[in-house]
Amino acid sequence: MSPQDFRFSNEPEPHKQRTRAILTSHPEVRELIGKNPTTFLAILFCVGSMVALAWLVRDAAWYWVLLLAYFVGAFFNHSLFVLIHECSHNLLFKKKSWNYLASILANLPHGLPSAVSFTRYHIIHHSHQGEFLWDADLPGRKEAAWFGNNPFSKALWLLLFPFFQLFRTFRLKHIRPLDGWIVTNWIVQFAFDAFIWIVFGPQALLFLLLSFFFSVGLHPLGARWIQEHYLTLDPVQETYSYYGPLNTIAFNVGYHNEHHDLPSVPWNRLPELRKRAPEFYNTLKAHRSWTLLFFRFLFDPSITLHSRMLRADRTPGQD
């Protein structure tokens, strides 16, 4: 595989077939499917912690704002992104509207409204993995070509990752860019930002924004985007899990193969899914360190934005 070309597969995405096999061999894993409303308490804790930190740094020296954003705020905001992901799968409450509201709350310390839009695109990612006109997780062709395999350009891509994630959505013509929930997300978010700016000061809002950009970008936590679907360990395996210690504070988001196989299993039960079906997961390659992957992505010229698997686009409902 050339680092300047995407890899193409004529095979269907791997998870649907493995899901059927797991449910046939281990029907008891259906017990793991369900809701976890206590996740909402984690949202409250993380949001409260970020608001408290924003208050503490409102008059701090600029270097303290930067350091706290990188070494503390990024971890809280990354956790909140994971919890938004849980909401996108309706894994907190039975009512979809309650999950939307929880995700909008979790979105507040990020500074930019994205929770509801993420839900729209992420669910499509599961059903159309690797399909260029459907999967917003795939880099754009120009995006991949621009950044090549230079360490500095890849670092810039990570730093600005939220913007590129936004730009990708413009190629997905099948999803409405606006609806009532998305507008609600924007109104609530910008009202919160205005409150932070007026009551805490602009430096507090800057802290929140820096924490968000670090949490998904130029930070070892940003390696999660490389870990999930980049062809880093095998030219054929297109989804990877991470089984390192940061899963403890990242709500098991590293269990990515398990999540794609059974997305109705909440974060706290994903390790149990792996234990109950070991023959399906212990044979797959996996990552053990986001930090090592972060530096490998930057400095290994064989890993580029082209290190992804593509397949033919399907129409909705087509198998």
Image (cartoon, helix red, strand yellow):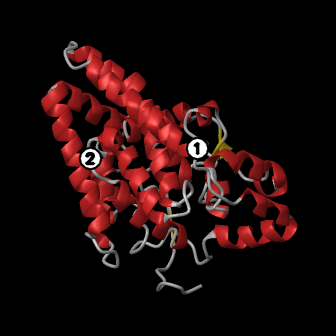
- The quarter of the image holding the C terminus is bottom right
Q: Is residue 237 left or right of residue 40?
A: right
Residue at 78% across / 53% down in the picture? 283
Q: Kindly identify the amino acid type of the residue bearing the numbered disc 2.
A: Leu
Q: Of helix, strand and loop, which one carries label 2?
A: loop
Contact (CB < 8 A) between labels 1 and 2? no
Q: Is residue 69 left or right of residue 41?
A: left
Q: Is residue 305 left or right of residue 8?
A: left
Q: Callout 2: 10 Å neighbours few (<14), some, many (20+)?
A: some
Q: Of helix, strand and loop, which one carries label 1?
A: loop
Front residue (pair 306, 180): 180
Front residue (pair 231, 102): 102
Residue at 41% across / 22% down in the picture? 71
Residue 116: x and y in percent read: 36, 59
Q: Callout 1: 10 Å neighbours few (<14), some, many (20+)?
A: few
- Residue 4 can be seen, yes or no: no
Report which residue position mark 2 lands on: 112
Residue 256: x and y in percent read: 61, 52
Q: 120 above or below 38? A: below
Report which residue position mark 1 lands on: 38
Residue 255: x and y in percent read: 64, 48
Front residue (pair 299, 80): 80
Depth check, mark 1 against mark 2: the one in front is: 1
Residue at 21% across / 17% down in the picture? 62
Q: Where on the picture, by quarter, is residue 151?
A: top left
Residue 308: x and y in percent read: 49, 60
